[in-house]
Image (tube, rainbow, N blue to C red):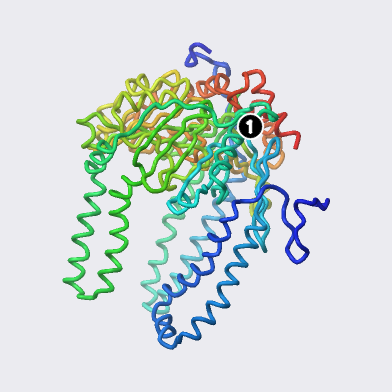
């Protein structure tokens, strides 16, 4: 306690966990769900108004779709989280990297949400709220069982280490 | 609500009165203005139609209208006063309001962040005051308007004493805690400091230039007025309004916390309990620096940044005086050491932020996380380690190329402060160390009820929250 910088309660390093593989097809589906209809609509519109050659421009939305296909895979691999003795670490991002540390004692609310599409893929996401609205700590793509385990564990730890403002 | 208590039952034709104390009987007269104000707002909103109507009005119609409106307004005022009450219990302050839509606010006493008494000019004449409460997690301030002045002072003392953890039976008699003056801002210093700010001159220049240009361009009086009125308002707020609001600013120390009194026409009395300050910002505008003046802003949970005058600890003072006051507001933090600990961002950060880089700085002391930014107006932000809610490391591709990264900490006043463009290795080490530091900082921090001893302080919130 005298020299907080040298305190090392967690041992050699945190144990990182990734998120479920099913998150990747889900995100790719959403990506194509936006860009394919756009390409088709653009193609039909151009073919009807300007001529079939111009309709080739409709292939343009497919370029970001192809890039996004790979980028989503890299982004999926970058999502990871670690439970340490006193805080939760969440890290994500490939180009823009972000690592958030949330002490258990500071969590006000732990929320597990699961939309219809996520449920189809057997996924849930976990969101942590502290008293600061700027703390945006979300872990997407957890298995429902893992999400519930994490929620219960975080709530329990949060109560044990709770602190006022 | 089930038992028919004698003091809550009125005559049968009146709605049930919620239990508790009433506001001052002057209140209905203020409330009576609401319908009239609504009518005026409607007239101003639909100006042309209102003028058409006013041309058709005769004295008889006006009289009839007043005959109908005044009793309705008075009745509304009376009924809303009738349905408003407050009650202090062991753990809560209960406020009941609303005639049609009933609202019952129960504010936990140990969550109260600050209690303000404000006395607008008219209220000062009548001898009443308004009590405003800041609690954690509420967006709007709950207020009790109006109370008799002695009653307001006594209620504030009782609320603060109970929030501080003085034995509940003794709380009503504890009375106003004694205070000791720490700082008083002379009128001359305040006026000079406002004159040295860019904002007032900027809006004044805009006020002179924009309407003139608009007049030359359009020659339409209404357009010119539409532009000039908001600008004049801004100009007033940045210059004379500021002097009026911050006139005779006094900071005093008492066991309740820091007392802030200010105002030329409307007197404002705020009390900031110790240990509830989430972050502190030392602001140094360019033209103040030669005189060594600074302003100190506070961030307190539940207090909005745009509240009038909200969040200012010291409007202007010499650096040393301001830092002395700051020591009282942030127990356990040494502001001098914090300011001295700031080191600038590395030189290679100029590839990311060519000019503003020179403003960026960051430092850590045993008490606080410190960041600095700004070239023209230099802002140094101090967040005590105990108040840090989460820590974030972020790095974009361009920053990674230069081995730089940003570290942000979030605090309880819904805000974050960012140490920009630090060395990436240093930032990673900071991320680890800051989490540890805020953990140990919390253990040694003051208890929520700051007058209780540490042993009782840990037990008190559970006890207080559990028994209603």
Q: Residues within 10 Å of mark 1 (few under 14, many from 20)?
A: many
Across and down, in percent, residue A79 comes to 54, 38
Identify which residue is drawn at 57% across, 69% down.
B73
Across and down, in percent, residue B296 comes to 36, 33
Identify which residue is drawn at 49% across, 35% down.
B271
Q: Check the residue under mark 1 and report the chain it is in.
A: B
From the viewer's perspective, tell me whether residue A85 is left or right of residue B169: left
Q: Secondary structure at mark 1?
A: helix
Quadrant of the rendered image containing residue B439: top right
* Extreme-left residue of the structure: B216
* Quarter placement of the C terminus of chain B: top right
Across and down, in percent, residue B295 comes to 33, 35
From the viewer's perspective, tell me whether residue B135 is left or right of residue B45: right
Q: Nearer the viewer, residue B303 or B452?
A: B452
From the viewer's perspective, tell me whether residue B14 is left or right of residue B423: right
Q: Nearer the viewer, residue B9 or B313?
A: B9
Quadrant of the rendered image containing residue B94: top right
* Extreme-front residue of the structure: B126
Across and down, in percent, residue B58 comes to 45, 87
Q: Is residue A114 visible?
A: no
- Residue A116 against residue B429 in the figure, above or below: below
Identify which residue is drawn at 36% across, 25% down.
B323
Residue at mark 1? B162
- Residue A32 against residue A151 in the figure, above or below: below
């Amino acid at each position: 306690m005298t020299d907080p910088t040298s305190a090392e309660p967690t041992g050699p390093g945190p144990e990182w966990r990734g998120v479920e593989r099913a998150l990747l097809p889900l995100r790719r589906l959403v990506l194509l769900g936006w860009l394919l209809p756009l390409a088709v609509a653009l193609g039909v519109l151009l073919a009807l108004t300007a001529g079939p050659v111009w309709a080739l421009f409709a292939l343009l939305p497919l370029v970001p779709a192809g890039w996004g296909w790979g980028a989503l895979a890299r982004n999926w691999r970058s999502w990871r989280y670690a439970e340490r003795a006193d805080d939760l670490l969440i890290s994500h991002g490939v180009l823009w990297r972000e690592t958030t540390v949330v002490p258990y004692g500071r969590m006000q609310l732990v929320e597990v949400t699961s939309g219809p599409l996520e449920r189809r893929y057997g996924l849930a996401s976990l969101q942590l709220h502290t008293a600061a609205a700027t703390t945006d700590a979300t872990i997407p793509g957890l298995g429902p069982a893992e999400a519930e385990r994490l929620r219960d564990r975080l709530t329990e730890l949060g109560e044990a280490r709770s602190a006022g403002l | 609500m089930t038992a028919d208590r004698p003091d809550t039952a009125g005559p049968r034709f009146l709605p049930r009165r919620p239990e508790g104390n009433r506001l001052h009987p002057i209140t209905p007269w203020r409330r009576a203005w609401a319908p009239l104000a609504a009518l005026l707002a409607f007239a101003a909103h639909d100006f042309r139609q209102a003028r058409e109507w006013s041309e058709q009005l005769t004295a008889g119609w006006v009289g009839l209208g007043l005959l109908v409106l005044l009793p309705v307004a008075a009745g509304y005022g009376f009924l809303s006063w009738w349905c408003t009450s407050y009650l202090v219990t062991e753990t809560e302050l209960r406020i009941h309001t609303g005639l049609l839509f009933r609202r019952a606010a129960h504010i936990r006493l140990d969550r109260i962040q600050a209690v303000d008494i404000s006395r607008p000019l008219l209220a000062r004449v009548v001898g009443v005051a308004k009590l405003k409460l800041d609690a954690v997690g509420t967006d709007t301030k709950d207020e009790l308007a109006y109370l008799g002045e002695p009653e307001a002072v006594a209620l504030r003392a009782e609320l603060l004493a109970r929030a501080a953890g003085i034995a509940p039976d003794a709380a009503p008699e504890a009375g106003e805690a004694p205070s000791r003056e720490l700082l008083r801002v002379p009128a001359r210093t305040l006026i000079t400091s406002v004159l040295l700010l860019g904002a007032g001159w900027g809006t004044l220049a805009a006020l002179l230039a924009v309407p003139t240009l608009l007049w030359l361009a359009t020659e339409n009086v209404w357009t010119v007025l539409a532009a000039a009125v908001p600008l004049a308002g801004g100009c007033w707020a940045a210059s004379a309004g500021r002097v009026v609001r911050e006139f005779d600013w006094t900071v005093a120390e008492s066991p309740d916390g820091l007392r802030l009194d200010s105002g030329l026409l409307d007197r404002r009395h705020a009390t900031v309990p110790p240990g509830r300050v989430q972050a502190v910002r030392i602001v140094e505008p360019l033209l103040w620096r030669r005189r060594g003046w600074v302003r100190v802003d506070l961030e307190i949970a539940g207090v909005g940044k745009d509240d009038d005058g909200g969040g200012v600890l010291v409007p202007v003072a010499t650096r040393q005086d301001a830092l002395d006051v700051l020591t009282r507001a942030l127990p356990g933090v040494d502001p001098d050491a914090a300011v001295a600990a700031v080191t600038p961002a590395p030189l290679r950060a100029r590839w990311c932020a060519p000019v503003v880089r020179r403003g960026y700085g960051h430092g850590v002391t045993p008490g606080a996380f410190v960041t600095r930014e700004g070239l023209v107006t230099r802002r140094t932000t101090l967040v005590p380690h105990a108040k840090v809610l989460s820590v974030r490391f972020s790095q974009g591709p361009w920053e990674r190329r230069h081995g730089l990264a940003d570290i942000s900490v979030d605090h309880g006043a819904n805000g974050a402060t960012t140490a920009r463009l630090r060395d990436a290795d240093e930032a990673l080490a900071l991320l680890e160390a800051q989490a540890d530091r805020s953990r140990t900082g919390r253990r040694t921090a003051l208890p929520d009820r700051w007058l209780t001893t540490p042993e009782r302080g840990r037990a008190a919130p559970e006890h207080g929250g559990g028994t209603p």
